[in-house]
Image (cartoon, helix red, strand yellow):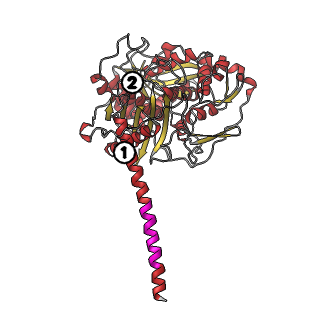
Amino acid sequence: MSRSVSSVSSSRSGSFFARLLAILSVAVTIVMVDSVNADAEAANPKYAGIVVDAKTGNVLYSENADRLQYPASLTKMMTLYMTFEALEQGRIRLDTPVPFSAHAAAQAPTKLGVRAGGTITVEQGILGLVTLSANDAATALGEMLGGGSEDRFAQLMTAKAHALGMTRTTYRNANGLPNTAQMTTARDQARLGIALRQHFPQYYGYFSTRAFKFGSRTIRSHNRLVGSVRGVDGIKTGYTRAAGFNLVSSVQVDGKSIVGVVMGGASTPARDAQMRNLIATYLPKASSRGGSSALIAQAAPAPAMIVTPAPVQPQKAQQVAKTITAAQPPVSAAAADLSLPHKGPLPDARYQVAETEVAYAETAAPKSDNPLVAQPIPAPAKVKTMTFKQQAAAAAPKPTPASVPSEQGDTSVDNVTTASTTPSPTRAASTSNGPAGWVVQVGVSPSRQMAMELLEGAKSKGGKALASAKPFAVAYAAGGDQLYRARFGGFDDQRDAVNACKALKKAGIKCWAAAQ
């Protein structure tokens, strides 16, 4: 009897170890495949990449980070930025109908497939962009926000990019479908990734959406790293034949936060493997201190479930474009307008679901030979710790007009690093335009009096940094309503404004430093 029990026990033990060895073998194989893909990607001549510490702005790794590249569907990050800004300013709502023109409906796949004359909600458009990378939805949103013109919206996108410090980026459409004049850099996309998270924490949760219901369809995300790599909460994939495979990823783990960019990838597996490699290599080098509140908003992960947006109300869809047009500032104003109020509720925690990979197909994806070239990413000895502003000063010369469209103007504002912490205002007479120079904005209010009261409270917490600051309110139209931006002026230079904003954020007041 004892021999029989011993035999059974031995058999079970052997079976357990056999299963364990099989699991370990699979894990090792996966790691080896990822390593091979990452090595091949580093040898790819179209490759560009960067990793930024989102708390400090330090560049931890860069490779061809300032070389001009095609953004492909990373373009939709700016389309979403403009959409979130319009939501925050009250010009549109999540349930606002988005009309589809014949031009929007005719965009190449991938797409939601809405017919000309149809509508979706703004929320459905957002979800379509972050999951399916829907080209028709991006164009429809762009036309609505651009007063019926995608070209007009592209001008606003470019102006906003330059205002954010993305000085080498030019947009020509809202979706990223091929256009030889539409260019960007890995560094600029890192700036945009950080800006999305910092400026719109109440909407950033959409980037973690792994599936949503659109009619009878369940649309799943293209971003395979969300849900499979610890701490990855977005942001965007992209592909065209000319661009290669692109990816921007935001990561938050154990108090550390980075944004990584991979552009020009040879294939989806190679691109994803390179991003995993970058995350594993450089996340440990990121700071757990610094201005986390300034650069990246911390948020608890959302529970998994499928999103079912509210049905659209189409009866007023025809009036939407005209309404948005009336509220949209001219391009010159958009370029200088860095007002990004932090208000509104956090998004409902409803967006994560089990992920199924969906092949990205703006155009047919080429097959990759995936050569086993042993050329790993640079060793830690090459790590750079310069800020965006410092790197911009040392970067390669600006492209000549022959190689870059003239719209790629030069902007010295580095808003990724200026958005740090603290506010406080001084009491002064409010004016319509306010003093020239640098300003600090602390919010938006429905009346001038409320804006001044907001400034009063902020100044009491700002201390010496706001001792000589001049509070004022700037009126602007938003969806037919009059709103007021609460700002402090009187700062001689960028440093003074940034220091004031840092002081305010330390006191728990969100703010933004900008050139008036």
Vertical comparison of 221 with 439: above or below: below
In this rendered view, identify the residue nearer to me: 496 or 117: 117
Amino acid type indicated by mark 1: Ser
Which residues lie in the magenta part? 9-22
Quadrant position of residue 251: top left
The structure residue drawn at horizontal position 37% and vertical position 16%, both measured from the top left corner, is 410
* The C terminus - image quarter: top left
Determine which residue is flagged by label 1. 35
Determine which residue is flagged by label 2. 469
Q: Secondary structure at mark 1?
A: helix
Foreground disc of the pair 1, 2? 1
Quadrant position of residue 376: top left
Crowd tier of the residue under label 1, counting other residues whose Cα lies within 10 Å: few below 14, some 14–19, many 20 or above? many
The structure residue drawn at horizontal position 42% and vertical position 68%, both measured from the top left corner, is 17
Question: Percent position (x, y) of residue 95?
Answer: 67, 32
Amino acid type indicated by mark 2: Ala
Question: Percent position (x, y) of residue 401?
Answer: 38, 10
Could you tell which of marks 1 and 2 lies nearer the N-terminus?
Answer: 1
Q: Is residue 166 left or right of residue 147?
A: left
